[in-house]
Structure formats: C-alpha cells, structure tokens
C-alpha cells in the first residue's frame, strides 16, 4: 500500500469524517511575536496538567510504581507522554502518546492512542492552559495483521501472574504498550497515520481511526532486545533506541524514520555518535541510509521532521533534567549530503536552555529554559515559528520539581530568521491531512 493511496473503503471512511477547516484554507501569516529580538524568543507557553485522564477510560498503571504525588494504579488512561505531534489548521494538535509508563513490562494496561489537544497561546503572565479535546484514535489490529500474540488477544491469558486488581480484558485487538512503543508520528496526504516505534523497531501504518492497515514493517538488519521475533538471535540496537523521529516529505510520498541510538555495527566501526536516517517508499525500506552525527555519543534523538524537501529539524538532547539538564537543542539539518560522505549537514537553530522571554510569557525566567529529560515534539507553524512539547514520562518528576509530577508543556518559539518551509507541511497549507479528522467517539 502506498503512502498516497488506500482502499476504496478507507477513502469512503475519510469522506465521512468531520472537516476541520474549509478545503480552500491557506497557511496563516507568520506570527512573529513578540517582535524580532534577533534571537530565538518565547512567543507562547501553555501547560496540560499531568493528571489529565481520558474521561470514562479504563484504569491503568497496575504494573507502575506510581509516585507519592500520584499513587498507582490510576483512575483512567493518562493523556501524557507526547512522543509525536501533528499541527492542525485551527490551532489544535494531534498528539501521539508513547507506550505508557516507560517499558514493555509495565505498560500492558496502557492503550496506545492519538489524542487532540488545544493549547491556549494568548494567556498573559504564564497562565496558559492546554486542554484535552478528545481521543481521536485508539490503535488496534482488527484484521490480525500482526503475526505474533498481542496483549489483549492471548498475551494476558498467557502471563504467569497478574498484579492485584487487574483482570484480563475481553479480546478486542486493541494495542497496548506491551505490544509497541510508538515514538514518532506523521499524517499522510490520505489522512492515514504512519508511526515509528522502538520495540522492533517497526514502521506502522494505521487508518485515521487507528486500525492497522499493513503488517508491521521491520527495519532491515536491525533488531532491539524487545523485538517480538528475536527468537534467541542477538539484537544489534540498544533497548529503547528505535524510531524516535520520522519525517515525511512535502508531497507525502517518502518517510524518513530515524534511530535514537547507534547500532552495534556503527559503534564497532568507531561511529558511536551516528544516528541512522532511513528512507521508506510505498511501505518498504530503500537500500542504504544517511547518518546524523550527534555532538556527544551519550546524546539521544528527541524528534525529526522535515521543513522542505531537503531540510529538516532535529531535537538532540542529553539525559539530564532539572538542574542537571545542559544540552537540549534543535538543529537545522541538510539531507542532501553535499560532500557525499554519508553524513547530513547540521547547524544550531535553537538552544532550548537559552530562549529569550522578555514578555514573561512563562514563569520560568528570562532566559526561559526547557530542562526536561525527554523533549520529543517539534512542529513548524510558519516560517518564523516552531512549537515544541515534552514527553513528561508520567508520573515522573524532575524537570520542574523534584516532588511534583512534570506536566506536558507547550511552547512556541519565534525564530530570528525565516525557515525555507514548504507550505504543504504547514498547518492550513495544501496538505489534505489538514482537512480530515476522526469523528467524535
């Protein structure tokens, strides 16, 4: 199945979905506030409270240790841990929640979902609140395209033991954090979802209601310790170092999934700082890959999105948080490999630990810092404005407080120079994915 075409039945489903904006909508003008200060400047700040749960959802966190502030299990499914995002023309965002509570072992009762949130971006004095609008899709495999056992269809029944208070759900083919660890997210021109994940690592293709359309696409020659088909073979990628980022080309025909860590082969060849960028066309991996060089082998990828056909944004970060956070940066990357050495070019765009905040749009000082362990979402809003969000690793603390759970923070940053952004990748641009959304549940 190609990126741009689907079955007639799926097309009919999309035609029945609610329109977000008129088909003739055009990209909004540059926001460019609070004025050109000559440096990256905070232009909006908003917070989704950590203890935001999907209304009426089933309890979760039975395997989680919880925290003093938020004891486990939890009363519902947290709207948390944003690992991918897609900006919509009306100012709202689709957000992909990650695998739940950090590992395959403790996330079996976390339903993999895509939510819709609405950041408040015009509140004065740091009072902006992001609201949960609805859950757009719960990921599922109704056609049994996954060739191994999933948690809600055999995995739970086969478990040697279950935590107190938890019983196996009726088989329904919905997917949980025991099945996949979704970390990157793109919307194709037909409205379907492409997701890069870490347990395989795999590339996954879902329709706009979250139903799997194809069997998971494995990465050629790369498997993590959590790969469900490992069968005793030796993995060659560290755990939780799969497709943390994945870009899509402006015409929607090419995906570029990017690993978060170096493979064993690259490390053995003296390239412990190398992150591979693959190319996927028509649901299949091309031969070969490019490499991105980290500033330090201990760093990790946060996100990777395209700005135009040749340029992309990369979040590169250290493993610190709060007082120990030092390196949280966004680079502008050139994918053309002009010198043909197999490495992409890069230059610093924003230091997230040093963002001007002259208007006090956040209460966290001037300069504003974004000192979270995992910062996993970046989106281009216009040629001079980007949006950034963190994965709060619910219910963990450490970014803003050592005792209170971190919240999901949303920031907009005005850039001193314009990006050469392709309008098809902008909210309200020509991309058809801006005009469809799953119906309310």
Image (cartoon, rainbow, N blue to C red):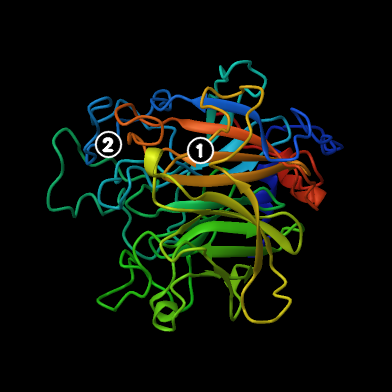
Residue that carries the numbered disc 1 in the rendered image: 370
For mark 1, does the 10 Å Cα neighbourhood hold few (<14), some (14 to 19), or many (20 or more) residues? many
Query: Taking the image as drawn, is residue 242 in sight?
Result: yes
Taking 319 as reference, is 414 left or right?
right
For mark 2, does the 10 Å Cα neighbourhood hold few (<14), some (14 to 19), or many (20 or more) residues? many
127 and 352: which is toward the camera: 352
Q: Position of residue 307 (x, y in %)?
A: 72, 54
Marks 1 and 2 in Cβ contact (< 8 Å): no
Q: Indicate which disc residue 61 carries.
A: 2
Q: Position of residue 354 (x, y in %)?
A: 57, 40
**Extreme residue toward the bottom, this view:** 269
Taking 111 as reference, is 43 left or right?
right
Label 2 element class? loop
On the image, which quarter does residue 21 sit in?
top right
On the image, which quarter does residue 209 sit in?
top right
The number of numbered discs placed on residues in the rendered structure image is: 2
Say which of marks 1 and 2 sits in front: 1
Q: Measure the alpha-carbon separation of dots 1 and 2.
A: 27 Å
Query: Taking the image as drawn, is residue 6 in sight?
Result: no
Taking 297 as reference, is 160 left or right?
left
Task: Give the residue at x 28% y 26%.
Answer: 70
User: Which of marks 2 and 1 precedes in the sequence?
Assistant: 2
Taking 170 as reference, is 278 left or right?
right
427 and 269: which is toward the camera: 269
User: Is 65 placed above or below 296 here?
Assistant: above
Q: Position of residue 46 (x, y in %)?
A: 56, 26
On the image, which quarter does residue 336 sit in?
bottom right
Label 1 element class? loop
């Amino acid at each position: 199945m190609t990126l741009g075409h689907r079955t007639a039945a799926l097309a009919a489903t999309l035609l029945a979905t609610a329109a977000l904006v008129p088909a003739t909508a055009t990209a909004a003008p540059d926001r460019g506030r609070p004025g050109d200060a000559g440096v990256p400047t905070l232009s909006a700040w908003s917070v989704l409270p950590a203890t935001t749960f999907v209304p009426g959802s089933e309890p979760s966190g039975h395997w989680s240790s919880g925290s003093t502030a938020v004891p486990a299990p939890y009363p519902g499914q947290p709207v948390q841990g944003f690992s991918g995002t897609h900006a919509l023309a009306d100012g709202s965002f689709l957000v992909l929640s990650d695998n739940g509570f950090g590992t395959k072992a403790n996330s079996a009762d976390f339903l993999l979902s895509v939510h819709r949130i609405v950041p408040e971006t015009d509140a004065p004095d740091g009072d902006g609140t992001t609201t949960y609008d609805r859950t757009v899709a719960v990921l599922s495999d109704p056609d049994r395209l996954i060739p191994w056992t999933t948690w809600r269809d055999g995995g739970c029944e086969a478990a040697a033991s279950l935590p107190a208070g938890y019983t196996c759900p009726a088989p329904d083919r919905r997917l949980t954090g025991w099945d996949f660890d979704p970390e990157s997210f793109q919307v194709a021109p037909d409205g379907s979802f492409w997701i890069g994940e870490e347990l395989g690592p795999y590339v996954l293709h879902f329709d706009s209601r979250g139903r799997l359309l194809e069997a998971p696409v494995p990465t050629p020659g790369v498997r993590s310790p959590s790969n469900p088909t490992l069968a005793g073979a030796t993995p060659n990628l560290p755990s939780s170092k799969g497709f943390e980022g994945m870009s899509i080309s402006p015409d929607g025909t090419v995906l570029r999934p990017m690993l978060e860590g170096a493979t064993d082969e690259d490390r053995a060849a003296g390239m412990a700082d190398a992150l591979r960028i693959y190319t996927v066309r028509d649901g299949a991996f091309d031969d070969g890959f490019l490499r991105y060089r980290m500033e330090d082998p201990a760093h990790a990828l946060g996100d990777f999105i395209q700005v135009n056909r040749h340029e992309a944004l990369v979040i590169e970060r250290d493993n610190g948080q709060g007082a120990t956070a030092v390196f949280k940066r966004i680079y502008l990357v050139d994918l053309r490999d002009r010198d043909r050495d197999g490495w992409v070019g890069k230059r610093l765009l924003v230091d997230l630990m040093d963002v001007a905040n002259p208007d006090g749009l956040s209460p966290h000082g001037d300069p504003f810092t974004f000192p979270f362990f995992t910062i996993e979402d970046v989106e281009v809003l216009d040629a001079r404005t980007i949006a950034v969000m963190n994965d709060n690793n619910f219910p963990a603390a450490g970014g803003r407080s050592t005792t209170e759970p971190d919240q999901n923070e949303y920031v907009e940053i005005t850039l001193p120079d314009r990006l050469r952004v392709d309008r098809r990748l902008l909210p309200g641009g020509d991309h058809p994915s801006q005009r469809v959304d799953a119906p309310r549940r």
